Amino acid sequence: MKVDSRRICQLFREMADFLSIKGENPFRIRAYEKAAEAIEHLPGDLENLYKKGELKNIPGIGKGMIEKIGTILHTGTLPAYEELKKEIPRGVVELLSIPEMGPKTVKLLYEKVGIKNIEDLEKFVNSQKLRHLPGMGAKTEENIKRGIELYKASRSRILLGKALPMVKEVMEELKKKASSLIERISTAGSLRRGKETIGDVDILVSSRKPSLVIDSFVELPFVKDVLAKGETKSSILTHQGLQIDLRVVEPDSFGAALQYFTGSKSHNIVLRERAIKRGLKINEYGVFTEKGEKKAGETEEGIYRYLDLSYIPPELRENRGEFEAAERGKLPHLIEEREIKGDLHIHTEASDGSNSIEELIEKAREKNYEYIGITDHSSSLRVGRGLSREALLSQIKKIERINSHLKGFQVLKGSEVDILKDGTLDYPDEILRRLDIVIIALHTGFKQDRETITNRIIKAMQNPYAQILAHPTGRLLGEREAYSLNMEKVLEVAKDRGIWLEINAQPQRLDLTDVWIMEAKKRGIKLVINTDAHHKEGLDMISLGVITARRGWLEKKDVINTLTLNELSKLLCKK
């Protein structure tokens, strides 16, 4: 039975939950959590690393966990996991996801009352019997009731691309409403780090009148429900079901609080350990000596500088080598959106897009681009109204006519060419050679086995006219998992053949992932950030691709479409 890293990651997290409910040793619980975090960010195939004996070099994966990984790879599961699964129903584990429900409370309700799932809990809370249990009370009962409501409202995580504009709007409105009170404002948490999906949103404000800022926040028009309100903290639920938590801090602690609440957890643990080794204490208020003297806190830069580190951008704070690089002054100069010179994957009304070439040119020039690639679908993709050979040739002529009237801008002739089931491409070579941009992509056969789908993609990459592999793993966040693909083999061929890998900026894709982007960069593979836009407003999604590229440590030199038109034209001629 083939078991991938996601399954092992999930299994370890469930083991940690089971052990928490049983009240087991915290160090044992943390060992499973740390291993799950390490596996989630592995720079390669788990099974290959295990076979090569290289897992011992991965922080967070000890000898005992390596043995357990081996057992799962060989048998598909762990005996201890199967025993705990019989002992503790899955619904009981889910109770840990509810705010106010810690392991001890879950254990009490399960063992003493027989609560096995959220439905049982909701009935019990509504009966007002929970308040009579040891250590409980009417207040606890009310808190758990609100926690259930919150869990239901925010059960599914929201895409980064949907969260960002919503939060930006909230922040702009808050700044207008409390402009005289707010000195600094920023997002924090996973949103600020650019994670692909977001749970709760954290906003941080510095102000000398925190209670007035809180009053303004809870009165915003976006608020559906005020979940909590204090002097310096408040939590709301928006009409879209997004929970937003606001914290207000003193100006001289803003940097420390921003660093602390941005995370990630694993990054902050390393930072705290670094402070302790220097005889210091670090928290959300600042960096302090053993005598309590405050040494830094007003800015994030000051926090890192006092701990002998270069400033670490939020997107890199995942404990994936950023500390070692910051110590040596070797952190990358991360790519910025202003460095993007064009978008090489755009659809028009000729296939399944909404706009004409002329409308897309106008939008691209507003973004100060020097070029765009028109890459409508190829003929076999019926659902995408793919272009027949004749239609593509006609489009090529149309683009040539348009280009003859353009100055300082060029439309590149291209196509998103389907990889057929046998690995050949949807258009013959005599058509492909007439294009400036040839993007290859899978749109069918997603459930083929690992070897078949890998060989299919690799065969397509061998075509002499192939240039870009679009949305390489095929995932759709919350809808479809990635193909069962040997990505390491794909990277080997991309390196050998000079194929550029796409970072697809569609909010539901963000594909490649940051982990594989890092691995591609290590191998010297070039990448392209594209929007795969199907309407002109979609070109603005480039920002999400840039965020993902930054999480993958990319610099301007790593990304093809930071080249000027002249530079790109020369490169395309060589290819």
Image (cartoon, rainbow, N blue to C red):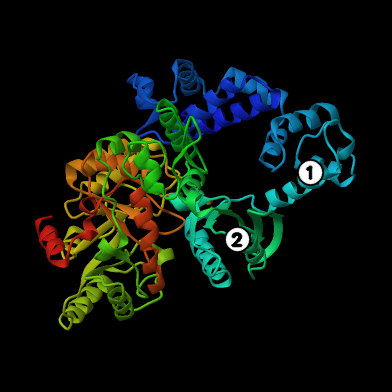
Residue 298 is marked as none
**How many marks can you see?**
2
In the rendered view of the protein, which quadrant contains the C terminus?
A: bottom left
Q: Give the residue pinned by disc 1.
A: 119
Foreground pick, 560 / 279: 279
Q: Is residue 327 left or right of residue 401?
A: right
Secondary structure found at label 1 = helix
The amino acid sitting under disc 1 is: Glu
Judge whether 377 appears above or below 502 on screen: below
Instruction: Give x and y (percent) for residue 180.
Output: 54, 69
User: Which residue corresponds to the image point at 67% horizontal and 54% vertical from the top-left?
Assistant: 231
* Image height of 558 relative to 337, above or below: above
Callout 2 environment at 10 Å: few (<14), some (14 to 19), or many (20+)? some
Q: Nearer the viewer, mark 1 or mark 2?
A: 2
| Residue 209 disc label | 2
Please, what secondary structure does the residue beneath circle 2 have?
Answer: loop
Callout 1: 10 Å neighbours few (<14), some, many (20+)?
A: few
- Spot the residue most to the bottom: 405
Residues 206 and 465: in front is 206
Q: Position of residue 328 (x, y in %)?
A: 25, 35
* Left or right of residue 416: residue 499: left
One can see residue 150 in this view: yes
Looking at the picture, which amino acid does disc 2 mark? Lys
